[in-house]
Image (tube, helix red, strand yellow):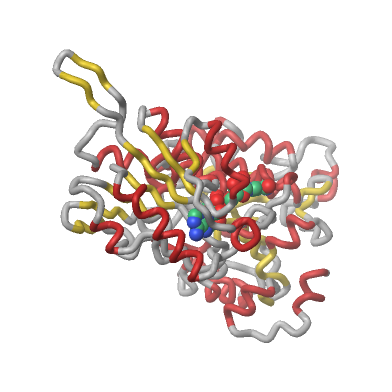
Amino acid sequence: MTAAPGSAAEEAAAPGDVPSTPRLGVPAESLPGERRVAITPTVLSQLTKAGLEVLVEAGAGEAAGFTDAAYSDKGATIASREEVFEAEALAMVRVMALDAESPDMERLRPDQVVVGMAAPFASPDVAAAIAARGATLFSLELVPRITRAQAMDVLSSQANVAGYKAVLLAAEALPKMFPLLTTAAGTIAPARVFVMGAGVAGLSAIATARRLGAVVEAYDVRPAVKEEVQSLGARFLELPLDTEQEGGGSGAYARAVSEETLRKQRELMTKTVAGSDVVITTAQVQGGRAPRLLTAEMVAQMAPGSVIVDLAAEQGGNCELTKPDRTVDADGVRVIGPVNLPSTVPYHASLTYAKNVANFVGLMMVDGALTPDVDDQVVRESAVCRGGEVVHPRVREALGVASADVGEEVAR
Ligand code: NAD
């Protein structure tokens, strides 16, 4: 896209100058197996209206089902990787392939704005490498969970996809069908599915399992989700535990419950687990290790053929037997530990991710100029690197950098 005739952008651009229309570059993802793309053709008009020119690396959307022609038809320029990295802002799914040694690091330049999922607590070295290049990094996992920012919440948009796909994996692995069927050859009982953790992924799993006809039960330490569970046609498992204060509290994230509460929780859930054909675990506590909800003994009580899908596999697993990216056979019970499920549904995962990114980038566009405003809570709290420094206090902590005056830095 070029500056509109007579526009301020055109007037400001002298021949030979760097174009004054800010460019958003979309490189192809380079993390092995990653099939999503950060920007889809569906959000191009939103971005161009905000005043951005969008450069998409040739083939970037192919694995997700978006051809180069689909991008160029909607106004994007198809470009080489070098050209894409010259843009003032970059949109990625996995920032720099989550690799501090990525060969792309040397393409970054001071004040270039990078937006994407950088896994800042798990890979703080990536943030440090980006800061060393002087670039600005906004990590979308850090978008605060306030109403205004819901449309930028990548954890939600991607968890929705993961919850759906977890049920499909379970249905595929289970030697039974999900729905109740009354046939001339007899009646087939519906599968019994137990969902642990009823956040975004858990609710998506409940809805999907219900659509397939399973009888679903769910548990969460936040009692506030009981009504949401019930509205999806599932039963909320009531446990005589006071988790409201301890784990539930208020706000969007659960806090870690004590080891003693977890032990009681496991004990109380054992019977439900033993009677389930499928257990889907989705429990997480922000920034920490996933709570251990299923022990080997609990798994041993499940019938052979039963299936566990552990969506917390990458965070240490909710089940003791989980191995990330593997299926473990425990005396006939299959424990599936999927990694990066959203990437296995790349079309819709990208579509929703791209909308989140476009909304976030839109926040930074003021009168056609890319102006990240740290007075905006969403921008400020998502900032990981600025001015050659890692500015996010918890990422600094993860790097072992003193955070004496970080508060001040972040505040301004
Ligand atoms: P998450 O991925 O951090 O955790 C998943 C679920 O695990 C949570 O519901 C949590 O309560 C549960 N959990 C933690 N420890 C557990 C344990 N020991 N046993 C059972 N369950 C346990 O959370 P999430 O799904 O990303 O989000 C949680 C909630 O936040 C959602 O219900 C959503 O409605 C809300 N949310 C709000 C906003 C917003 O207001 N902008 C944005 C996103 C999500």
348 sits left or right of 227 in the view: left
| The furthest residue to the front | 240
In the picture as drawn, the residue positioned furthest to the top comes out as 184
Q: Residue at 77% of width from left, 48% of height from top?
A: 365
On the picture, is 361 further left or further right than 264?
Answer: right
Left or right: 21 in relation to 102 = right
Question: Would residue 336 be found to the left or right of residue 251 on screen?
Answer: left
Residue 331 appears in the rendering: yes
Figure disc tally: 0
**Residue ranking furthest to the left:** 185
Task: Locate residue 335, reporting x and y percent.
Answer: 28, 55
Q: Which is nearer the eye, 110 or 341?
A: 341
Q: Image quadrant for the N terminus?
A: top right
State whether residue 124 is above or below residue 2.
Answer: below
Picture coordinates of residue 398 (x, y %)?
Answer: 58, 78
| Place of residue 394 in the rendered image (x, y in percent of width and height, measured from the top left) | 64, 73
Q: Residue at x 47, y 37 (%)?
A: 235
The one nearer the camera, 196 or 117, is 196
The quarter holding residue 297 reads bottom left
Quarter the C terminus occupies: bottom right
Residue 398 sits above or below residue 53 on the image: below
Q: Position of residue 261 (x, y in %)?
A: 51, 65
The residue shown at (30%, 34%) is: 191
Tell me if residue 81 can be seen: no
Using the image as rendered, state which of residue 361 and residue 407 is in the foreground.
Answer: 407
Q: Nearer the viewer, residue 2 or 221?
A: 221
Residue appearing at x 28%, y 57% in the figure:
299
